[in-house]
Amino acid sequence: MSSDNSAKEALHWAKTRYLSIWVLIIWFIFSFVVHLFAKSLNEFSLNGFPLGYYFAVQGSLIIFVVLIVVQNLLQDKIDNETGLSSE
């Protein structure tokens, strides 16, 4: 029975690590890469604000909140699939 639990824990950790890596990649892109293009995006405007500013301030925050929700939903799915959920 111990080896069965070890296999579940290894699978759980592998899936969790994979999810964490993707979340960090997406976070990095919207924290740093999008802001590198802010100057060129400022040529356009949205509701009177430069588009680069709008993406940097509003867009990143929206993406971060959505990213948190999606990560939690996917982590719950991983926990349930491997039988290691707290419920």
Image (spheres, grey):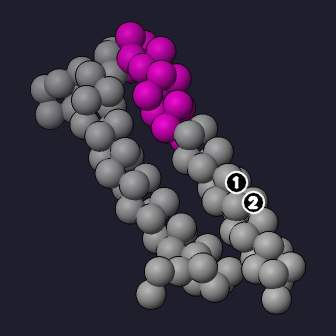
The numbered disc on residue 18 is 1
Left or right placement of residue 74 versus residue 11 in this view: left
Amino acid type, residue under disc 1 in the picture: Tyr
Q: Which residue is drawn at the image coordinates 72% and 70% (left, top)?
A: 9
Q: Going 13% across and 26% down the picture, which residue do you hit?
A: 48
Q: Residues within 10 Å of mark 1 (few under 14, many from 20)?
A: few
Amino acid, disc 2: Ala
Q: Which numbered disc covers residue 61?
A: none
- State which quarter of the image contains the N terminus: bottom right
Q: Which residues are magenta?
A: 26-41
**Camera-side residue of 24 and 81:** 81
| Residue 35 x, y percent position in the rendering | 42, 20
The answer to whether residue 51 is visible is no
Do the residues under discs 2 and 1 have CB atoms within 8 angstroms?
yes
- Of helix, strand and loop, which one carries label 2? helix
Name the residue located 76 percent from the left edge and 80 percent from the top edge: 5
Q: Quadrant of residue 58?
A: top left
- Which secondary structure type mostly characterizes the magenta part of the structure? helix
Which residue occupies 43% across, 53% down? 67
> Is 12 left, or right, of 36 in this rendering?
right
SS at badge 1: helix
Residue 29 in the image: above or below residue 9: above
Q: Image height check: is 39 above or below 83? A: above
Q: How far across and down, in percent of the image, does residue 39 sit? A: 38, 10
Q: Quadrant of residue 25?
A: top right
C-alpha span from label 2 to label 1? 6 Å
Depth check: 16 or 3 in front?
A: 3
Residue of label 2: 14
Task: Return the residue nearer the eye: 80 or 61.
Answer: 80
In reply to whether residue 58 is colored magenta, the answer given is no
Q: Is residue 46 left or right of residue 6?
A: left
Relative to 12, residue 52 above or below? above
